[in-house]
Amino acid sequence: LIYEIELKEVITNIDKWEADTMRRYAATHYPGLDTLSSHFYFKTLHDAGTDTIESGTVNVRYIGRLLDGWVFDTNIADTAKKYGIYDPENDYNALEFQYSQDIETMEKDNSMVRGFCMGLKEMSYGDEAFTMFGSKYGYDFTGKDPIGPYQPLIFWLHIEPKE
């Protein structure tokens, strides 16, 4: 086989490229949405109007996507089936997440990326939200199979109501 390859663009500033890519995505899908901090977007989709979470265990439903829409992880069985990532060995229960006032503690206690924790930190019981963050809050320059390096991530998050 003979392949013809054409170089379309050379990216010399990956940080700027990620920021521009996320800004374009937000403008297309969530007009008017702005960052809460550098490389971190958050939007409440449903505000349950409950008190803020101080600490303890919360049950979280989530869907993780890349900016092209590809679902790489979820704990919702129907979504996993729809996107061809269903694993019958998985129980698809809500994630029991140890909530804390400290992001670093949440990352460590739950083995989750910082952007995921930052999104949950903005939420209350019963809330549903969208968060998008750059690789510095995800898997950075190393990636983690199946997520490549310098890959912005999107999560739909839902914290189940307090029992």
Image (spheres, helix red, strand yellow):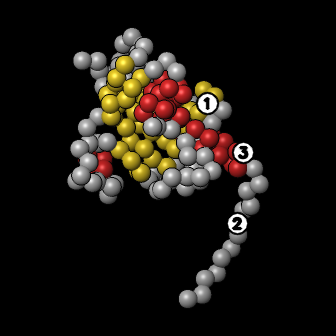
- Mark in the foreground, 3 or 2: 3
Task: Determine whether 78 is above or below 111 in the image.
Answer: below
> Earlier along the polypeptide chain: callout 1 or callout 2?
2
Q: Residues within 10 Å of mark 1 (few under 14, many from 20)?
A: some
Identify the element where label 1 is drawn. Answer: strand
Residue 29: give x, y in percent of width and height.
51, 40
Label 3 sits on a secondary structure element that is helix
Who's the residue at 52% across and 48% down the image?
Answer: 67
Query: What amino acid does circle 2 point to?
Result: Lys
For the C terminus, the image quarter is top left
The quadrant in which the N terminus is found is bottom right
Residue 10, by quadrant, is: bottom right
Q: Which residue is drawn at the image coordinates 72% and 62% (left, top)?
A: 9
Residue placed under numbered mark 1 in the picture: 35
Disc 1 to disc 2, C-alpha distance: 29 Å
Instruction: Please say if the residues under marks 3 and 2 sit with CB atoms less than 8 Å apart.
Output: no
Distance, label 3 to label 2, CA atoms, is 17 Å
Residue in the image at 49% along x and 32% along y? 107
> In the image shown, does 137 or 104 lie closer to the viewer?
104
Which residue corresponds to mark 2? 8
Q: Amino acid at mark 3?
A: Lys
Classify residue 114 as left or right of residue 61: right
* Amino acid type shown at disc 1: Thr
Q: In the image, is residue 90 above or below residue 44?
A: below
Alpha carbons under labels 1 and 3: distance apart: 14 Å
Q: Position of residue 51 (x, y in %)?
A: 39, 11
Residue contact between numbered discs 1 and 2, judged by CB atoms under 8 Å: no
Q: Is residue 37 visible?
A: yes
Q: Earlier in the sequence, mark 1 or mark 3?
A: 3
Label 2's element? loop
Q: Which residue lies under the disc numbered 3?
A: 16
